[in-house]
Amino acid sequence: MTDTGGEIVQFDNVGLRYGTGKEVLTDISFTLFPGSFYFLTGASGAGKTSLLKMLYLAQRPSRGMIRMFGTDAITLSRDRLPGFRRRLGVVFQDFRLVPHLSAFDNVALPLRVAGVEEDDLRKPVADTLEWVGLGDRSHARPATLSGGEQQRVAIARAVITRPDMLVADEPTGNVDPDMAVKLLRLFEALNRLGTTVVVATHDIHLLKKVPESLIMRLDRGRLSDPTGALRYPPRPAAGVAR
Amino acid sequence: MSAPPTLPRALIARLRTVSDAISGASEAQLVPQTRLSGPIPWVIAIMVLLTVVAAAGGLSLTNLAGQASADLAGGITVQVVSAAPEERARQANDALAALREAPGVAAVRLVPAAEVDALIEPWLGTRSSDADALPIPALIDARLDGPVSAARLADLRARLATVAPKARVDAQSGWLEPVFGAVEALGWLALALVGLLAVTTSAAVLLAARTALDSHRDTIEIVHMLGGTDRQIARIFQRSIAIDASAGGLLGLALAVTVILALGQRFTALGSGLVGGAGLGWSDWLLLGLVPLTVVALATLTARLAVLRALRQIL
């Protein structure tokens, strides 16, 4: 099945439980549209990371239906998963940089995985590191970088392929307020270029920094919709209107 | 802050599919190479050393058996056992004449008394005179134009029975039959050892691959999340194992060749005709040279299968 050109992600009555425990996510239904900017909020333990894991195809739900890029993501064969993952950019809460690789090599990783020649990846990687303000730290290994710098390397790695959707889990959790705003501006810049952005955060002050964003709120595994993000058809997405 | 750089269209067009993804250098960077600091090169070196020495032993024994068998094939020995020297000489000459007349006998000679004395000298010492010496059988060495069969042996015995009743006819190969049996058993033992070592090598590589997989699980998950395929990740590990196995294989081969050459010199110094046939030909050395290559291929394949199997447990 091919892209419909409409929704980029659709969750329908999705539930998730780990093992035989009770459901950590219940009846999750929402639709994400191309070019929109979404915040996923909720207290710690509300299920944000679990929901994001399903969004970046690291976790299958226990029930319900997930469509991604117009295709049923639940029954997606293992061989097709990498192709879908290459359309996503993920910023992990704990950065998940490869410790023995330099900042340059970490950022180059998605391109290398995609088979880009070494000669062809040097400039985009250097430009992207410059873009996140780490042009002079390209040879540094993660252990020698500050938390904020590691976060920016992780963001550079997530955006280097210009993904269709960027998923960021608490991307400002380890940085000071000024850096948090700077990182948000990076996401906005990417969003303006057409990438759908989903940022999970428990920092409600951050939401005000992107006034046109749509907000999804998780409360004990259930989703609420304070800005109409989940309405179908939803209100015109801010990212699309811009 | 400015907008992020866009990837040139040509660059996007060059994104490759899995089959031709990632060049060797960049791929190898994903998992730090342990080289000789890890256990695999040493395990492989020991395995290759043992396998090459066992294989060389098997090949030497096979060569020895083959050479001895070829030397003795078609050979018969006629002993004329008589205490009376004149009678012994007469029957020996008659037997010699009968053998020359017999069909299928390619060559025949009476072994000179001096040669017989030299043969038995290590056991009986130098014979001082005919008078006090033990009677020694007259020996006739004959060679048939084909292998010695029971029927041909019976025919020759029948021919000699009339002219030399004291003659005993034996196939030369018959004396060494138990030795050939033992050599053949040792050859099979060497082959079994090579097989067991191959299994042990695979098991060691399997464990090493799993250990490497566990210690790099975080990196693997990251590569997975970035769209890396199972084959790509398997290729990283199989390349890593192949490099380690190659280093170990070369080391093991060098040690094994040293051991074989040293042992060869020792056996050559024995000066025994039997051991002289146990040398290694160029084809044998070629086979031994294939051992490390086979071990590297086996290790690489084992690592690939182990990693692919383990990766299927991860989404």
Image (tube, coloured by chain):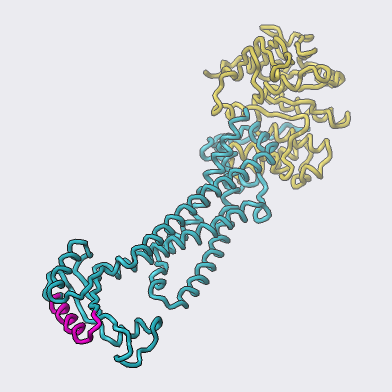
Residue placed at 69% from the left, 12% from the top?
A30
Q: Which image quarter is the N terminus of chain B in?
A: top right
Which tint is chain B?
Answer: cyan
Residue placed at 71% from the left, 14% from the top?
A237
In magenta stretch: residue B97: yes
User: Can the viewer see residue A194 in this picture?
Assistant: no
Comparing A91 with B209, the one in front is: B209
Comparing B171 with B275, the one in front is: B171
Classified by dominant secondary structure, the portion drawn in magenta counts as helix
In the rendered image of this protein, does residue A241 appear above or below residue A102? Answer: above
Q: Is residue A209 left or right of residue B118?
A: right
Chain letter of the yellow region: A
Residue placed at 54% from the left, 68% from the top?
B258
Q: What x and y, as percent, mark residue A136?
A: 78, 45
Q: What x and y, as percent, mark residue A33?
A: 66, 16
* The magenta segment: B82-98
